[in-house]
């Protein structure tokens, strides 16, 4: 009987555990099961508090409520009823006659009120010996346990302990899983923020594992499997792939690590750059690498910054070279002229010739002054100090005519002819010095790049704006340079073939912007350019 | 008809100044405004004792001019005095195989000495 009862007991608990029933339900079922099969027996399961001073949990559905409520207020001890003593000593306590047993002296009346006459109590222990509580059987009559009874309560206490340990293990596993999930989430987030993905590669089977961020970085569907190593060739340019392959092969041969800059295959998103790092993390007993691991990082922003910085530096260096040339040329002429003048004072003095030389010197001085002014202008505009001196009734038409007059000689010299169409008396609130800079820069460009062909200058009212158009039929500007030419230090042609600082159009754009207008160019290579400036008339 | 010096510079004022300086020293000077016109003059059989070359010029600059004459041993044997304003990389200068490189503004005595050393 004991064996079959024990077997079904175990079966019941296993069933309850596999159904993932809560602890309370399991204990209640256990007690019900036991009481059903042992008529007259009343079961209780008690658990100690943390300090092991009192019982804090009571499972005893068949005992009267007042009895169960009294238990948590009583201290355990060396003579504290059957359960209190069993828990205190860690030993089984058998009391056959509660009313006459010294262990029950304090609680005799309580037991009498509950109509309890005997109580056998078995401590519930962990394998370490730590006492968790008690499993007890009461009877309403004086009762002496048989061998079988002792066996049953021992095994019942063991089962309760096992159930409790099972729950504790489950709790720990769940906690650990939560922690892992949390740190995994942290890792995913950290990888996302750093734009750095991680990967593993089992070399023998060519099995690749990718973190989520790798998919993000490579712009691939995260629901697709990772690409085997050989297929990753399609991600990068051929040159990049060859370098990566060589680096991986080298790492595998030496057991070392690598870091490679990679350029992505051309895509609609524009150029992409990556940094791949990796190392051998596992080798077999013969020293052959079996696993590599590493990271992939999106480096596009950094590369673009580097690229922009480099081109800005190049533009600046070119500008310095051009500026140096532009400044040194008049300086050299000036210096040589003075030398020639000094020489000619030695012999017969030809006053006319010397005067003409001095005139040349003055011209070179003026040229230097103009260049330096231009340079200073650029530095101050670049630093955000464009000063506008707005005046009412500035006559744009007269201003354009005057600039044309100044350039007439140069236009003739260049072989170009001039067609002008200036609507008279377009006046507005403008800065006349800055307006003159706009017109001067555009006309001198038209002469410089006009290839000796006719130049047209138009000025007219257009809605509430003044529209200035300057046409040439010269070398033109390739489409990819048309935006760039308005940037500082930029020019569409190589600096050695055309003179000038490469600042003219940038200055024009800055002034036009300050005057709340617009400037743009329409051009075709070897056909010429039309520069248009639209300024609001205020 | 030949002269001592072929002067290649696009800046009319500077070109005139250098020419006058050299003519003051008694040399004959032929003037031209860029590498392309200079090449035409040299190809037509004109052979100066020395070439004075500007670096930065429209149409054909000094560097391209040197590349062009390097294939013609007749012309490439003529010593070149290079006048430059900007900082030209040393490798570029080496490639151009010029006899002398002088930076603008020109040190007049150095310049005249250099010219003198190639014209006897």
Image (cartoon, rainbow, N blue to C red):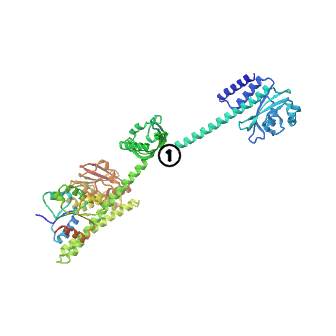
Q: Going by the picture, which residue comes out furthest to the right? A: A100
Locate the N terminus of chain A and report the quarter of the image it occupies: top right
Q: Nearer the viewer, residue B34 or A177?
A: A177
In the displayed structure image, the side of residue A24 where residue A189 appears, left or right: left
Q: Residues within 10 Å of mark 1 (few under 14, many from 20)?
A: few
Q: Going by the picture, which residue comes out furthest to the left? A: B1
Q: Count of labels shown?
A: 1
| Any part of residue A391 in sight | no
In the displayed structure image, the side of residue A22 where residue A445 appears, left or right: left
Residue A450 in picture, x, y percent from top left: 23, 54
Taking the spot 71% from the left edge, 24% from the top edge, the residue there is A7
Is residue A113 depicted above or below A77 in this figure?
above
Is residue A309 depicted above or below A38 in this figure?
below
Residue A225 in picture, x, y percent from top left: 46, 34
Residue B24 in picture, x, y percent from top left: 18, 72
Q: Going by the picture, which residue comes out furthest to the front? A: A286
Residue A183 in picture, x, y percent from top left: 56, 42
In the rendered image, which residue does mark 1 sit on?
A193
Specify the quadrant of the image occupied by residue A88: top right
Q: Nearer the viewer, residue A428 or B77?
A: B77
In the displayed structure image, the side of residue A78 where residue A377 appears, left or right: left
Specify the quadrant of the image occupied by residue A178: top right
Residue under mark 1: which chain is it in?
A
Q: Nearer the viewer, residue A427 or A237?
A: A237
Q: Nearer the viewer, residue B104 or A48?
A: A48
Taking the spot 55% from the left edge, 43% from the top edge, the residue there is A186
Locate the C terminus of chain A and report the quarter of the image it occupies: bottom left
User: What kind of element bears circle 1?
Assistant: helix
| Any part of residue A54 in sight | yes
């Amino acid at each position: 009987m004991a064996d079959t009862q024990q077997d079904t007991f175990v079966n019941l608990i296993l069933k309850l555990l596999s159904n993932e029933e809560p602890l309370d339900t399991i204990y209640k079922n256990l007690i019900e099961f036991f009481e059903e099969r042992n008529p007259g027996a009343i079961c209780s399961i008690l658990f100690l508090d943390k300090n092991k001073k009192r019982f804090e949990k009571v499972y005893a559905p068949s005992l009267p409520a007042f009895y169960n409520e009294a238990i948590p207020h009583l201290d355990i001890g060396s003579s504290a009823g059957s359960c209190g003593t069993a828990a205190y000593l860690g030993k089984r306590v058998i009391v056959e006659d509660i009313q006459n047993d010294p262990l029950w002296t304090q609680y005799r009346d309580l037991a009498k009120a509950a109509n309890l006459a005997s109580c056998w109590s078995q401590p519930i222990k962990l394998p370490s010996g730590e006492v968790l509580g008690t499993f007890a059987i009461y009877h309403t009559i004086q009762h002496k346990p048989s061998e079988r009874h002792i066996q049953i309560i021992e095994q019942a206490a063991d089962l309760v302990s096992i159930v409790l340990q099972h729950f504790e293990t489950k709790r720990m596993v769940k906690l650990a899983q939560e922690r892992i999930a949390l740190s995994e989430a942290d890792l995913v987030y950290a990888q996302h923020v750093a734009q750095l993905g991680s990967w593993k590669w089992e070399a023998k089977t060519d099995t690749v594992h990718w973190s989520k961020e790798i998919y993000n970085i490579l712009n691939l569907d995260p629901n697709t499997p990772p690409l085997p190593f050989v297929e990753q060739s399609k991600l990068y340019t051929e040159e990049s792939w060859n370098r990566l392959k060589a680096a991986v092969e080298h790492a595998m041969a030496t057991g070392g690590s690598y870091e490679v800059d990679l350029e992505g295959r051309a895509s609609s998103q524009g150029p992409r750059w990556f940094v791949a790092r990796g190392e051998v993390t596992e080798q077999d007993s013969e020293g052959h690498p079996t696993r590599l691991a590493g990271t992939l990082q999106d480096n596009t922003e950094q590369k673009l910054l580097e690229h922009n910085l480099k081109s800005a530096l190049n533009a600046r260096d070119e500008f310095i070279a051009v500026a140096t040339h532009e400044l040194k040329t008049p300086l050299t002429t000036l210096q040589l002229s003075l030398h020639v003048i000094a020489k000619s004072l030695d012999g017969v003095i030809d006053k006319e010739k010397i005067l003409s030389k001095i005139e040349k010197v003055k011209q070179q001085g003026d040229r230097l002054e103009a260049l330096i002014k231009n340079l200073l202008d650029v530095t101050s505009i670049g630093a955000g100090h464009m000063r506008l001196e707005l005046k009412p009734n500035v006559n744009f038409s007269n201003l354009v005519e005057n600039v044309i007059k100044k350039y007439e000689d140069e236009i003739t010299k260049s072989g170009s002819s001039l067609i002008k169409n200036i609507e008279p008396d377009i006046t507005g609130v403008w800065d006349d010095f800055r307006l003159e800079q706009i017109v001067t820069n555009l006309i001198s460009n038209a002469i410089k790049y006009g290839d000796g062909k006719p130049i047209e200058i138009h000025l007219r009212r257009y809605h509430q704006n003044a529209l200035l158009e300057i046409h040439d039929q010269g070398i033109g500007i390739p489409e990819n340079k048309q935006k760039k030419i308005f940037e500082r230090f930029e020019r569409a042609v190589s600096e050695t073939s055309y003179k000038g600082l490469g600042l003219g159009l940038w200055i024009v754009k800055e002034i036009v912007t300050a005057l709340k207008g617009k400037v743009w160019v329409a051009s075709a290579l070897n056909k010429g350019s039309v520069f248009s400036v639209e300024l609001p008339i205020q | 008809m030949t002269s001592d010096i072929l002067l290649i510079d696009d800046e009319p004022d500077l070109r005139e100044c250098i020419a006058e300086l050299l003519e003051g020293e008694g040399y004959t000077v032929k003037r031209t405004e860029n590498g392309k016109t200079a090449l035409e003059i040299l190809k037509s059989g004109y052979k100066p004792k020395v070439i004075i070359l500007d670096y930065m010029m429209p149409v054909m600059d000094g560097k391209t001019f040197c590349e062009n004459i390097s294939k013609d041993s007749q012309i490439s044997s003529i010593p070149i005095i290079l006048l430059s304003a900007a900082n030209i990389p040393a490798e570029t200068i080496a490639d151009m195989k010029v006899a002398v490189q002088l930076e603008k503004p020109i040190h007049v005595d150095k310049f005249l000495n250099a010219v003198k050393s190639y014209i006897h």
